[in-house]
DNA sequence: CACACTTTTTGCGTGCCGCGCAAATTTTCG
DNA sequence: CGAAAATTTGCGCGGCACGCAAAAAGTGTG
């Protein structure tokens, strides 16, 4: 890979990190594109060569996970059931210690209205790659078979629901158990549940 | 309901319809807020009292479906299995003849990058209301039980996947069968599928 | 290294947008 | 009707996305 490609990747990463950092510090509304560019060491005009908006830059951080998930999925044992493999790969992504910074970051991206749209677009992109990985694993073709996309969509959706639940949990709970429960019940086919306990109202 | 409320609803609807109409005619990029306001008979400034952007106005059209779905869900026979009720309600929404205008509208909202974010936000809102309806139906509480949100998310996701598949179908296929297949296999729990036929490449 | 070629960065200009503010207008209700 | 409350509107400002062309940086060859 030539110097050019490396510099482009570096510039993109630098802009994205700078955008996220400043947004976390001052709130997304109080960050100017000018600041982000300065922090990343490029001109303001260059920012828009990489991102169409500051929101896009802020939410682009998680996008490099997509290829990792896909790769991880293909490295699972070939005879492992699909659902087990998918669940293992997703949990792997959030396996680290419950980072305090991640809480704030996810909360910001999911709750702040000006970021929601871009956040959902980023999730959709990850979902697309996940669907490709699933298709590759089971030997299907996304163009003709909806199954891989359905699984990827359900997994992505369950992940989002779990994170919402986690962010709302009072007192603060652990992400992993919540995420695991969501994915497990999804893998179990979301059968009509036993009548749950009444709300506490 | 007083005159004020009625006028507000009317203005909002007029703006949203005007935005959609102009976007369909000239493409979202070539529509000015000024035009939308003029078409709706209000001042440009007033536009932003109702919507934060023209993209939001364009995508707001489908938002009144949310309450209809919720209501429809609660009117299904009480002893009907949840999945059957949900599937029936969703299909009901798209039950009409395959409108040529709807094809173009959905394609525009899903494919045009500048609309994707708002479109996904609108879907999220619908999903939230659907989750509330499901919770109400099975006597659960969204705050403590993820099940309703998981079902709503999976259904919403499957609907989106089906629509994508439909938009990409070559030659153009019917929406209803595709949507039905997606929801049925979801309700069946997305079991690991039999090995499908090879891609035609 | 020199040099021509390609690609990226940068500065500048332009049109559009979101929104705060306060005055004008409209609706509500006693 | 008349005062109070809510909405619309005009105005202005800061900011943003992007086209364009010049400058700068990287690439490959002799």
Image (cartoon, coloured by chain):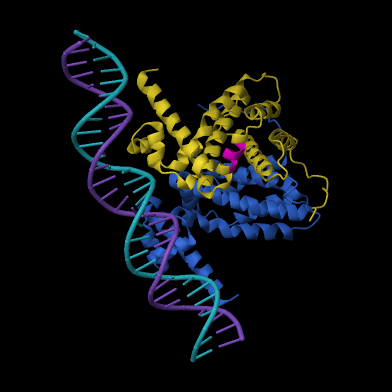
Chain colours: A yellow, B blue, C purple, D cyan
The segment highlighted magenta reads: A102-107
Q: Quadrant of the N terminus of chain B?
A: bottom right
Vertical side of A114 occupied by B192: above or below:
above
Whether residue A54 appears in this view of the structure is yes
In this view, the residue in front, B71 or A143, is B71
In this view, the residue in front, B161 or B66, is B66
Q: Is A149 included in the stretch rendered in magenta?
A: no
At a point 58% along the width and 41% down the height, the residue shown is B161
Task: Give the quarter of the image for residue B181.
Answer: top right
Vertical side of A96 occupied by C27: above or below:
below
At a point 50% along the width and 65% down the height, the residue shown is B12
Instruction: Give the main secondary structure of the magenta stretch.
Output: helix
At a point 55% along the width and 49% down the height, the residue shown is B121
Q: How many marks?
A: 0
Q: Is residue B171 left or right of residue A48?
A: right
Q: Can you give x and y, in whole percent of width and height, for residue B79 in the image? A: 81, 54
Q: Can you give x and y, in whole percent of width and height, for residue C26 in the image? A: 46, 78
In this view, the residue in front, A39 or A136, is A39
Vertical side of B70 occupied by A194: above or below:
above
Task: Give the quarter of the image for residue B146.
Answer: top right
Q: Can you give x and y, in whole percent of width and height, for residue A141 in the image? A: 56, 29
Q: Can you give x and y, in whole percent of width and height, for residue A82 in the image? A: 68, 27
Whether residue B169 appears in this view of the structure is no
């Amino acid at each position: 890979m030539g110097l050019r490609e490396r510099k482009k990747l570096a510039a993109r990463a630098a802009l994205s990190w700078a955008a996220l950092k400043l947004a976390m510090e001052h709130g997304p509304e109080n960050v100017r594109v000018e600041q982000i560019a300065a922090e990343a060491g490029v001109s303001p005009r260059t920012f828009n060569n990489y991102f169409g908006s500051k929101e896009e830059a802020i939410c682009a951080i998680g996008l490099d996970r997509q290829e990792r998930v896909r790769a991880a999925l293909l490295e699972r044992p070939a005879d492992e059931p699909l659902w087990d493999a998918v669940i293992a790969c997703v949990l792997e992504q959030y396996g680290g210690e419950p980072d305090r910074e991640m809480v704030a970051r996810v909360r910001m991206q999911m709750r702040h209205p000006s970021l929601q749209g871009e956040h959902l677009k980023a999730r959709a992109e990850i979902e697309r790659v996940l669907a490709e990985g699933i298709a590759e694993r089971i030997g299907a073709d996304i163009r003709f078979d909806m199954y891989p996309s359905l699984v990827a969509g359900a997994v992505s959706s369950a992940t989002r629901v779990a994170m919402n639940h986690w962010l709302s949990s009072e007192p603060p709970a652990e992400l992993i158990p919540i995420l695991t429960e969501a994915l497990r019940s999804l893998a179990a086919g979301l059968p009509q549940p036993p009548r749950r306990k009444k709300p506490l109202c």
